[in-house]
Image: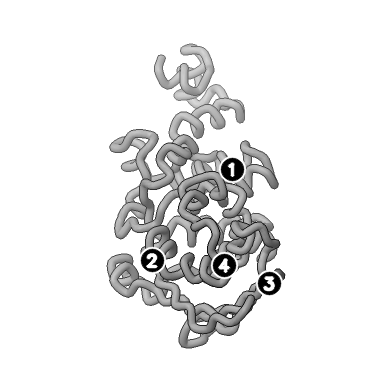
Amino acid sequence: DTTASVLKISHEQFQHFLKQKFDLPLSSLENLAKECNVTIDNIFKEQIDFQQIEGQPNSSLPVRYKKAAKSKRRTLLNIFDYISNKRGPHYLHYILRSFQIDPDTFTKANEDETINHLFLTDLLSRLHLDGFNEQDILLMGQNSYNTNKNGKLGQLIPVGKSPKATIEYFFDYLAPLFDLNYSYQLMKSKHSHYQVKIVQNEDIAHQLKLNSLGSRLVDITKLGVISSFPQYLGLGPARAQFIRSFHDGDASTELSFQYLQ
């Protein structure tokens, strides 16, 4: 009776189904998928982690995203906000369930809880397959200003300092607080033009058994986030571009950005 209730069919219909005398309606599969916190695609493609369903509460992350969890969920909330605004909350919930993650796992109240870097990499790859282009990925990063300006990050922005001193403060003090997966080295700082070198945390890469953290798409979100920094100063987004990228075959990832005064 419990299974029939989940499928939203009668006990008699369920018995007929077991005897292959009744075809389940699509709505029943949708209810089953929702109850198991997966998607219908997961069911048809047999891409279901049953240990995750049986052994963990809905709010728990899959094991893949727990090891070396040094990323704050704040970054993901920003991306979810962009996705929801662009394609609607139903699409966002569908994407999260395709990773067997309950949408309620991510809330403003737990934005400082952690998840590992693999989820951001997997998420951006999936979104790219679903039609989000590199400009969308860049705008996801830039959207961080809208989601963070009134939050913890916005409250840490010093008041009364020059734009140059504030941007140096971003990289010297704030970046290590909010991103342990990488270090950010401000290499050149002149007037409104800056050059930044991004270096991955080798210990985290080793724990995740990766030669390199992230992907080109992850780098593009970083480009967007960094280009949003001048907005905290009441300026427009910076013009930012890659000088070189590890994920394009270069020895390191470096970018430059310039804001308009």
Rendered image: mark on residue 181: 2
Disc with the residue nearer the chain's start (3 vs 4) = 4
The crowd level at tag 2 (other Cα within 10 Å; few <14, some 14-19, many 20+) is: many
| Picture quadrant where residue 91 is located | top right
Specify the quadrant that holds the C terminus.
bottom right
Does residue 207 appear left or right of residue 238 in this picture? left
Above or below, 197 against 114 in this view is: below
Q: Which residue is mark 4?
A: 162
Circle 2 sits in a helix, a strand or a loop, which is it?
Answer: loop
Does residue 182 appear left or right of residue 223 in this picture? left
Q: How is the image coloured?
A: one colour
Rendered image: mark on residue 92: 1
Disc with the residue nearer the chain's start (1 vs 4) = 1
Above or below, 148 against 142 in this view is: above
Give how far apart the Cα atoms at labels 3 and 1 are.
29 Å
Disc with the residue nearer the chain's start (1 vs 2) = 1
Residue at (63, 76) in percent of width and height: 192
| Picture quadrant where residue 193 is located | bottom right
Give how far apart the Cα atoms at labels 1 and 4 are.
39 Å
Q: Label 1 sits on what residue type?
A: Leu
Residue at (43, 62) in percent of width and height: 174
Give how far apart the Cα atoms at labels 3 and 4 are.
19 Å
Disc with the residue nearer the chain's start (3 vs 2) = 2
Mark 3 vs mark 2: in front: 3
Q: Label 4 sits on what residue type?
A: Ser
Q: Position of residue 195 (x, y in %)?
A: 55, 80
Above or below, 124 against 28 in this view is: below
Mark 1 vs mark 4: in front: 4
Q: Label 2 sits on what residue type?
A: Asn
Circle 1 sits in a helix, a strand or a loop, which is it?
Answer: helix
